[in-house]
Amino acid sequence: MSIQWFPGHMAKAKREAKEKMKLIDVVIELVDARIPLSSRNPVIDEITQGKPRMIILNKSDLADPNMNKVWRKHFEDKGHVVIEVDAQKGKGIKGIPPAVKEQASAMIEKMIRKGMKPRAVRALILGIPNVGKSTLINRLANKKIAKIGDRPGVTKSQQWIKVGKEMELLDTPGILWPKFDDEAVGFRLALTGAIKEEIFDFQETAVFFLKYVKEAYPEILKDRYNLTEVPDDIVELFDEIGKKRGCLVSGGLVDYDRTAELVFRDFRSGKLGRLTLEQP
Ligand code: GDP
């Protein structure tokens, strides 16, 4: 479920995330593998305050496998530990606890040096709405943890979930807002379900999507909509898709609203195949 973010909500979410930082050793930052930059929070560095952090490319099953590799390298080159995950099916999950432990190795060594018995490493999942935080928590917990509203400010007492012997996970994720300043980012968030359908325009969003896909994945458009060539002109492309799929109004003209919605639904449902909507 997506929410509307206002300055007050953002300030509160930030404050709550910062509070949680005091409790944990490692941050697990969740991003959508289809939009790894657009699904990041703009002030994540400030919020995580230098805590060891890893990046999970979630929904990697929906993203272009080649681009998953490109994005992984992009973040690794910046010094991050990166894991590709499909939280829905549980793929990639096993790699998380050892990576979390590795991230906390300095802390563990320090405890040993002081003669203390190392405790389980405490982690927090952090990310924007709909990126798969609850799904991942349930996977790691191996059971269904009740989902609290995707609203900052809905608090309950914190509980730790044991994940194996050496890791503990905070049972409520940190919910952060996405970027809003860039129109392209807004379209990507709309396409992937991070913002409510009521607040964006299907036609505009579909135009943005088709412009990108006709350059990056022309074969996908040809296959799905049975096109011999992908027209360069976006209106022509709408016309072709609308005609092929019977999105017409009386007189045989193409219904652009319905065509836009069809394209949008085809992407969301995965019928177009695995696509990544941005490049490093
Ligand atoms: P949250 O708002 O971040 O807690 O997101 P949720 O865990 O509620 O997930 C949002 C939607 O994405 C749900 O419909 C999930 O089933 C779906 N989802 C989560 N992770 C994955 C994934 O890795 N792959 C796919 N295909 N869907 C996922």
Image: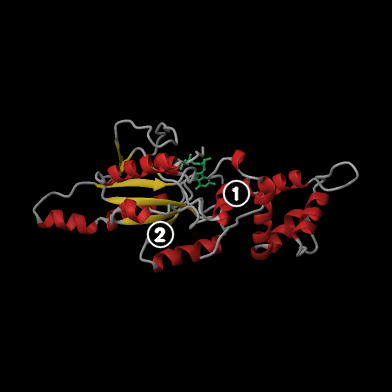
Tell whether label 2 touches label 1 (CB within 8 Å).
no
Figure quadrant of residue 20: top left
Quick one: which residue is furthest to the right in this view? 251
- Mark 1 is on which residue type? Leu
Please indicate, yes or no, whether residue 97 appears anywhere in the rendered image. no
- Which tag, 1 or 2, sits closer to the chain's start? 2
The residue beneath circle 2 is: 82
As drawn, the label of residue 191 is 1
- In front: 123, or 51? 51
Query: Taking 168 as reference, is 80 above or below it?
Result: below
For the residue labelled by badge 2, is the local secondary structure a helix, a strand or a loop? strand
Q: Which quarter of the picture shows residue 208? A: bottom right
Q: How far across and how far down the image is residue 29, in percent?
A: 39, 52
Measuring 82% from the left and 45% from the top, which residue is drawn there?
246
Q: Amino acid under label 2?
A: Val
Q: Residue furthest bottom?
A: 77
In this rendered view, identify the residue nearer to me: 91 or 145: 145
- Image check: 22 left or right of 82? left
Task: Tell me which residue sits at (47%, 44%) in the image.
Answer: 132
Q: Say few, some or many: other residues with alpha carbon within 10 Å of mark 1 (under 14 / 14 to 19 / 20 or more).
A: many
Q: At 45% across and 63% down in the image, what residue appears?
A: 72
From the viewer's perspective, tell me whether residue 88 is left or right of residue 173: right
Query: Marks 1 and 2, how far apart in space?
Result: 24 Å
